[in-house]
């Protein structure tokens, strides 16, 4: 019985569950105080409504600090587990700090610390998936992880509204602390990436790197617009031989010998990749827009319809559930052979990103025209669905691209698959984009709402999403090389 229990945690389903739970908890902690912010800041602390967006923005500032610093250390050392455990500890302690805060500056500092912790667990959790899964099998596990994220981000306000109504600010803090500690225990039980790879390899459950065959495309997109011919049997066989040698000896291949040090993919390498930068730009624009909605919707529902924190939380169910459904459906759709043959093994994700985020912007503008709670909830459901299916491929595209960059270096004998990648750094770059969005857009949204009202905010956010998505992702679809 004990062996069955411990063996479960050394499996791919356990890893996916861990990452999904990590993203779920991170995003719950982001959104759980959203419905209560007007009451906490305006009623309890007598602060201006202008600081509401700034409080959410401090979470983004924390992510901006935590994600790149720890992801660099993690990629350099190859360790994920230790840093994630520390992240969950910080997440729990800072969550208690929110409940104990009596003054505005105290809750801002606690919020900053939760952002730092979330940046750590976010980027390292997603990196664990691309440590284990090859590029062509990333969409389904990432869609599962993303479901945790969207359920938490959209469902957090629902949970927070109920908890604050019945148990107050400390009730919210105790809940956040408890789920953080639960996730930390889960992280302790799941092996670190290197150990998990070896365990899966020994049991024959580690997926080999196999390029997806298409009817007209034999080349896989790699880095800096250079393509690697993975249809050549000699290339793929050389790659497999080098990876096995590296994993067994714990080093990297260089001039026929295994050595301990090798060239690393750096942040500067990532910044040179057009597809990575396009994904980050659309993340800033669309995630920023949705975070802006999360700030103004509670204020709007409170001012316009007199809803309390609990009822405001209920309205976010439509956003959360539809976003999960959209993410899960299109995670599967993107992996379909039909999509691969029609659009290419990697470029297919950008077509889905383009469609989903474009529609998210359109429905955001429609939301500004609604006149009742019921119609607002219906449109929020459409926003959530489109946001879900438009953003699952963003994380999958980043993971696939960094994997291909790493595999190219392995095939050329430059580095190992584990040592030369920047698996957590690419997601820290994603988190930087995400934190910029959460740092700036909620503040801007609050100011616009205060001065111009609900319709103006939605029109500005929605049109920015539409134009920004077309310009960033449209350029990849039309002009970038590779499949």
Image (cartoon, helix red, strand yellow):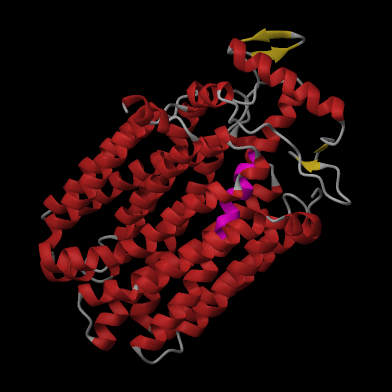
Q: Nearer the viewer, residue 197 or 97?
A: 197
Q: Main secondary structure of the magenta part?
A: helix
At 64% from the left and 60% from the top, the residue drawn is 333
Q: Quadrant of residue 168?
A: bottom left
Q: Whole-percent x and y of residue 295?
A: 34, 69
At 74% from the left and 18% from the top, the residue drawn is 241
In this rendering, would 422 be left or right of 456?
right
In this rendering, would 98 be left or right of 206?
left
In this rendering, would 257 be left or right of 54?
right
Q: Is residue 338 magenta?
A: no
> In the picture shown, does residue 89 fall above or below 353?
above
Q: Quadrant of the N terminus?
A: top left
> In the picture shown, does residue 30 fall above or below 382?
above
Q: Nearer the viewer, residue 367 or 321?
A: 321
At 24% from the left and 63% from the top, the residue drawn is 160
Magenta region: which residues? 391-402
Q: Whole-percent x and y of residue 459?
A: 50, 81
Q: Is residue 392 magenta?
A: yes
Q: Nearer the viewer, residue 135 or 335?
A: 335
Q: Quadrant of residue 400?
A: top right
Q: Whole-percent x and y of residue 229?
A: 85, 35
Q: Whole-percent x and y of residue 90?
A: 27, 38
Q: Quadrant of residue 257?
A: top right
């Amino acid at each position: 019985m004990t062996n069955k229990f411990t063996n479960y945690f050394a499996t791919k389903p356990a890893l996916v569950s861990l990452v999904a739970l990590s993203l779920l908890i991170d995003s719950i902690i982001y959104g759980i105080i959203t419905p209560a912010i007007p009451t906490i800041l305006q009623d309890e602390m007598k602060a201006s409504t202008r600081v509401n967006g700034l409080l959410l923005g401090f979470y983004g500032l924390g992510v901006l600090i935590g994600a790149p610093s720890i992801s660099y250390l993690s990629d350099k050392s190859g360790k994920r587990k230790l840093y994630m455990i520390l992240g969950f500890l910080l997440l729990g302690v800072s969550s208690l700090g929110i409940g104990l805060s009596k003054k505005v500056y105290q809750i801002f500092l606690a919020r900053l610390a939760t952002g730092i912790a979330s940046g750590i667990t976010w980027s390292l959790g997603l990196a664990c998936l691309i440590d284990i899964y090859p590029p062509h099998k990333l969409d389904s596990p990432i869609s599962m992880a993303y479901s945790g994220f969207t359920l938490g981000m959209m469902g957090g306000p629902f949970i927070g509204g109920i908890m604050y109504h019945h148990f107050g600010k400390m009730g919210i803090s105790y809940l956040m602390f408890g789920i953080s500690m639960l996730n930390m225990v889960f992280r302790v039980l799941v092996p670190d990436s290197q150990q998990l790879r070896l365990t899966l390899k020994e049991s024959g459950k580690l997926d080999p790197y196999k390029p997806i065959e298409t009817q007209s495309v034999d080349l896989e997109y790699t880095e800096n617009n250079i393509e690697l011919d993975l249809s050549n049997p000699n290339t793929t066989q050389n790659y497999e031989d080098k990876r096995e040698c590296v994993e067994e000896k714990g080093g990297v291949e260089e001039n026929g010998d295994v050595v301990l040090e090798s060239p690393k993919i750096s942040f500067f390498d990532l910044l040179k990749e057009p597809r990575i930068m396009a994904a980050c730009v659309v993340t800033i624009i669309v995630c920023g827009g949705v975070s802006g909605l999360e700030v103004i919707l509670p204020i709007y529902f409170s001012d316009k319809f007199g809803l309390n924190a609990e009822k405001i939380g209920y309205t976010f169910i439509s956003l959360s559930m539809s976003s999960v459904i959209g993410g899960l459906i299109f995670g599967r759709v993107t992996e379909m052979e039909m999509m691969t043959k029609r659009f290419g093994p990697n470029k297919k994700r950008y077509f889905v990103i383009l469609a989903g985020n474009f529609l998210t912007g359109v429905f955001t503008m429609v939301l500004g025209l609604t006149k009742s709670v019921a119609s607002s909830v219906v449109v929020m459901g459409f926003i959530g669905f489109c946001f879900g299916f438009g953003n699952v491929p963003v994380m999958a595209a980043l993971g696939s691209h960094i994997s291909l960059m790493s595999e190219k270096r392995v095939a050329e004998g430059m580095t190992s698959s584990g040592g030369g990648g920047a698996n957590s750094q690419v997601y820290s770059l994603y988190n930087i984009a995400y934190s910029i969005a959460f740092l700036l857009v909620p503040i801007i949204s609050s100011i616009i709402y205060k001065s111009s009202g609900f319709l103006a905010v939605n029109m500005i956010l929605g049109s920015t999403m539409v134009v920004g998505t077309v310009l960033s992702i449209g350029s990849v679809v039309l002009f970038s090389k590779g499949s």
